[in-house]
Image: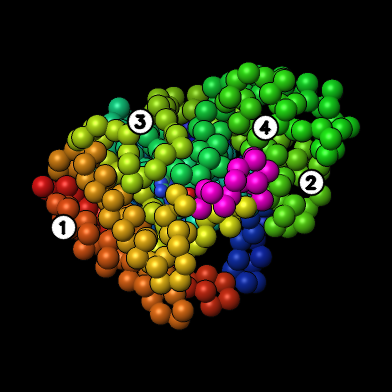
Amino acid sequence: MLNIAVNFKREINIMEVKRLKTKGETMIERTEDQFWAYEIDENNSKEDLVLLDNVQFIYELSLAELELKALDVNFEVTNGLREFKILNKSNEQKKLIKRKGAYYKTVDGQLTDYFKIIQKNRTRSVNQYLTHWIYPYKGKFHPQMIRALLNIIGLNEGDTVLDPFSGSGTTALEAQLLGINFIGIDISPLCVIQGKVKTESIYFIDEIKKLKKEIFQNYSSNLFQTDENYYDILNNLSEDERIKNFYRLARLLAVSDNSRRKRDFFNSFIKNIDLMISSVEDFIRVKDELNLTLGNVKIEVGDSRNIKLSDNSVDGIITSPPYSIALDYVENDIHSLKDLGFDVLKMRDDFIGVRGNGRSKIELYNEDMKKSYKEMHRVLKKDKYAVIVIGNATYQGQEVKTVEFTIDIMENLGFKLEKNINKIIFGLYNVMKKENILIFKKVK
Ligand SMILES: C[S@@+](CC[C@H](N)C(=O)[O-])C[C@H]1O[C@@H](n2cnc3c(N)ncnc32)[C@H](O)[C@@H]1O
């Protein structure tokens, strides 16, 4: 047990975590191209279960508990609050938590798989490990929460989960890591590219690296000149859509960096390609180290109001629809969508929460979401769960009760609300983010 920790420590070449003792703060330092939020020492607590250091909110504790319940583990919280005692000790259950759990650092002093996965992080953000960070999509799920929810709704290797608003592909990657098959649709082609690149690139990293050499050897000087079309160059260099998607997204990252942060386009492009490749290689490494069986991933452009799946065909749904009219998803990614050559004006008509003007926007949202929830009900198997993460929006200073609306519609369709978890987060500068995690069971 100790050996595993020591070996892992040696292997990743652990660095010093500098402590500012006077303030009681610990800096998260970068070494070997990675950021480390945690110490891995040989004195891991021998308590049965220890929570990860980043678990801080009440909703996370609640999910951590639900996760244990779903894995049939009886437990008791110890005085330290971050350590749990397992009451029904069986090796089988401990193995399960170590392999699948989302909120635990150690089980019997042994590091969990999730702990090892999140060490492979090229960013400063603790939840943007592996390929999650690629592209700064607004409104991404917290991946740790998704891993927990996949466990909570009882999904196992070989099951299929659907996200009909798959966005940047958070559920896709987390399902894949747990060996759960994933089907995702999103109306935005930009989102579909993100999800695909994050989950598919591990299967052809050699070709990706080969193309990088070719691009830089032959085209670097004129790659971004106006008379040279980058996408035409890509089409000439490769026929494989998966590889082209990787290089499309690398360019779009630079487009986004340039439009949002005024970063130099070409420098940003080069830096991002290297980081993207390193992240994909991290993914391959951790998959091999932990002997993970990955789930299959299928992501397509599609409309959640008309899902192309048969009735009663999926084992679970985890999703987060637009929060009423809170965010204009077309406007938010306008630079990238235009760069890809899309007619953004035409596109708006299919985006839920964006259609229409003024008050009619909310009515159209409600109408569209009724259709989407009906579709979710149709494709989900009976007695299985649909998790909807959603918050209220504000329109002209007034709260739009999207959460209540959602519960109402879902219950009318034949879902039963099993849990309604408040997810309140206070951020910097007095910003409060309030959402609900709604767990429904299809009972009718
Ligand atoms: C809250 S975001 C999802 C974010 C996602 N959970 C993540 O982790 O990145 C909502 C998504 O709904 C998508 N969307 C809007 N209208 C849609 C429609 N008619 N069909 C499918 N997706 C749609 C948007 O493009 C957006 O990506």
User: Disc 2 vs disc 4: Cβ atoms closer than 8 Å?
Assistant: no
Position of 422 with respect to 273 (left or right) is left
Q: Which residue is mark 3?
A: 181
* Main SS category, magenta section: helix
Question: What kind of residue is marked 4?
Answer: Tyr
SS label for mark 3: strand
Disc 4 and disc 3: Cα gap in Å? 25 Å
Point out the tag, 1 or 3, that comes first from the N-terminus: 3
The answer to whether residue 339 is magenta is yes
Q: Which residue appears at 75% of the width and 33% of the height?
A: 230
User: Disc 4 vs disc 3: Cβ atoms closer than 8 Å?
Assistant: no
Q: Which residue is mark 2?
A: 265
- Report the disc number at residue 247: 4
Up/down of 337 relative to 419, above or below:
above
Up/down of 220 relative to 145, above or below:
above
Question: What kind of residue is marked 1?
Answer: Asn
Question: What kind of residue is marked 3?
Answer: Asn
